[in-house]
Image: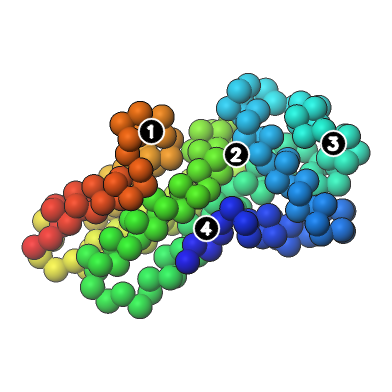
Amino acid sequence: MTPLDGVNIWSYVLDRNAARITVKRRKPALENLERIFNATFKLANEVGFRAMTLRDLCHETGLSMGGLYGYISNKDQLAEMIEDVVRHATHEMPRLFDGLAAPLDKLEALIRASIYVSEILQPWFYFVFMDSRVLPAQHRHTAKASELHVQALFAGVIAAIPGRPAGDAELVAAHLIATFQDWYVKRWKYRAANVDPDLFADSAVRMMRGYLSA
C-alpha cells in the first residue's frame, strides 16, 4: 500500500525529474539513479553531505563527471530530489486512510504507516532529518514545511478524538512524530535490542491509545 517502495522509487525519481535528466534510455537511467542515491547516502554518512563533492560521487558510483551531469548538475539538485521523495511519501500515505471514520483507528493507521514507510525509505528520511540543516535556506524551509504538514494532519485527527485528555493537539502530534523519528534516526539502538518495525509500531500504538482513549 505504500506510495513508494524499494522498487518503484527509481521510476518515480526518473519520471519526476525527466525534464532535467538527459539520459533517455530508461533501464540504464534507473540503474544509475539507484547507484547515485545509494552512493550519496553512503558518503553523507561517512563524510557529511556538505563535505561530499561531485568528484567523490563519481568515484563512488564509477560514473564519469559527464555521466553524472546527465542526472544532476550540482548537490543542491540532489538534495532537492531526495526531499521530494520524502515529501511525496509522507503526503500521499495519509490518503490511503481517508475512509477510516474512527479517529483512534485512523491515528493508529497513520502511526503504523509512518513507521513502515520510514523503514522502507530509511536512508531518505535519515538524510532529510540529519542533513537538511546544512542545505540552502530554500531546502531547509521545504523540509520544515513538510514535517509541519504531517504534524498538522496528526493534530487534526487527535482533536477529533472524543473524550481525549485536555491539551494541545499539536503538541501531542509533535510527540508522536518524535517517536517514529527516533525509529529511523537511531536504528542502531533498536537493532541492538532486537526490536523490529512491527514490535516498535505495536508499542507506539499502545502508548498512543493508552493516553488518548476515553
Give the labeled residue for mark 4: 89
Identity of the amino acid at label 4? Answer: Ala
Q: Considering depth in this image, is 74 or 203 the residue closer to the camera?
A: 203
Q: Position of residue 144 (x, y in %)?
A: 48, 46
First of labels 4, 2 by sequence position: 4
Q: Which mark is residue 191?
A: 1
Identity of the amino acid at label 3? Answer: Leu
Between the C-alphas of marks 1 and 3, the distance is 34 Å
The label nearer to you, 1 versus 3, is 1
Give the labeled residue for mark 3: 63
Q: Please give the name of the residue rendered at 35% of the width and 78% of the height, measured from the top-left corner.
A: 99
Q: Please give the name of the residue rendered at 68% of the width and 55% of the height, measured from the top-left corner.
A: 10
Give the labeled residue for mark 2: 137
Number of other residues with Cα within 10 Å of mark 4, as a class: few under 14, some 14 to 19, many 20 or more: many
Q: Position of residue 147 (x, y in %)?
A: 44, 50
Q: Which mark is residue 163?
A: none
Q: Position of residue 43 (x, y in %)?
A: 65, 28
First of labels 4, 3 by sequence position: 3
Evaluate if marks 2 and 1 touch, with contact meaning CB atoms under 8 Å apart. no
Could you tell whether 82 is left or right of 62 in the image? left
